[in-house]
Amino acid sequence: MASGVWVVNLAREHLGPAAVNAILSPDEIARADRFLRPADRRRFLGSHLAVRLVLGRALGIDPADLDFAAGPNGKPELKPCGRDRLDFNLSHSGDFALIGVSRQGAIGVDVEVARPIADTLRVARAHFAPSEIQTLEGCTSEALPGAFFACWTCKEAFVKATGAGLSKRLDRFAVTIPPAPARVVSIDGDATAGRTWSLHRLAPAPGHVGAVAIAAPDTACEVLHLEPGWARARW
């Protein structure tokens, strides 16, 4: 698999302490302990355990042996392990997580629970590119929420792939909005730069919207699901 995204159900798995303590690092466990709400702690532990299992399978090494570092803008990355370069990214919302993995270029993923937003167009006008705002303004009231979240997740996935974090303004690049096929239209007004990226919209679970961005043109992305019992597997 050159590029793919794993869909992870965080709600249905029992996170036994044996798996958590055997696979996660002391730093990851300490970070989880800082969450005040048990549900948030459980989602953090589950998503990070799933990342290690997915990457361990992709690289053919023990998940507990993976070593991570922060990139220039804080994006987590694998420390060199003598294998082909493997980029990854994690996003979780509600009871689901997405884990993107790519050998073809930087990857970013985003998943959001589709929830009501009080003033969708006001939010879009404050953050989105002019072409995106214009398209959203032309949507019917029924189509607007779905179109907004499709745009939002694609933009977040792109920003996460670049590793720019909050330093990348969302109005400096534009993406398409349904029903148009997903793609990066332009970056800083440059359409040619947009064509160096691949963008995919996802429907990872009922009530959830997702997207994946890959820094390589014309790149397919396989969607996979972790099977029941993944939290107890050592693969």
Image (cartoon, rainbow, N blue to C red):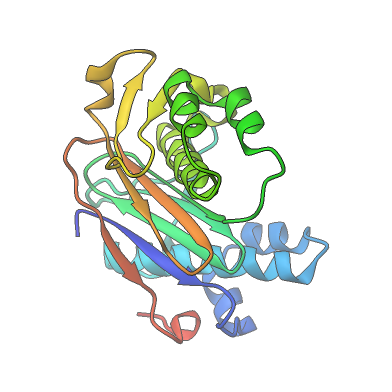
Q: Which image quarter is the C terminus in?
A: bottom left
Q: Locate residue 134, reporting x and y percent.
A: 46, 24
Kindly identify the residue that appears in the image at 35 percent across and 34 percent down.
176
Q: Between residues 114 and 69, which one lies in front from this camera angle? A: 114
Q: Between residues 201 and 233, which one lies in front from this camera angle? A: 201
The residue positioned farthest toward the front in the image shown: 140
Q: Locate residue 104, reporting x and y percent.
A: 21, 43
Q: Quadrant of residue 35?
A: bottom right
When the figure is inspected, residue 58 is found, relative to residue 101, above or below; the finding is below
- Residue 201 can be seen in this image: yes
In this rendering, position of residue 161 left or right of residue 34: left
Q: Quadrant of residue 175?
A: top left
In this rendering, position of residue 120 left or right of residue 96: right
Q: Locate residue 214, reporting x and y percent.
A: 30, 41
Q: Which image quarter is the N terminus in?
A: bottom left
The residue positioned farthest toward the top in the image shown: 189
The residue positioned farthest toward the right in the image shown: 36
* Number of numbered discs visible in the structure rendering: 0
The residue positioned farthest toward the left in the image shown: 218
In this rendering, position of residue 76 left or right of residue 220: right
- Residue 64 can be seen in this image: no
Kindly identify the residue that appears in the image at 51 percent across and 30 percent down.
137
In this rendering, position of residue 224 left or right of residue 66: left
When the figure is inspected, residue 43 is found, relative to residue 78, above or below; the finding is below
Q: Locate residue 48, reporting x and y percent.
A: 54, 63
Kindly identify the residue that appears in the image at 56 percent across and 83 percent down.
12
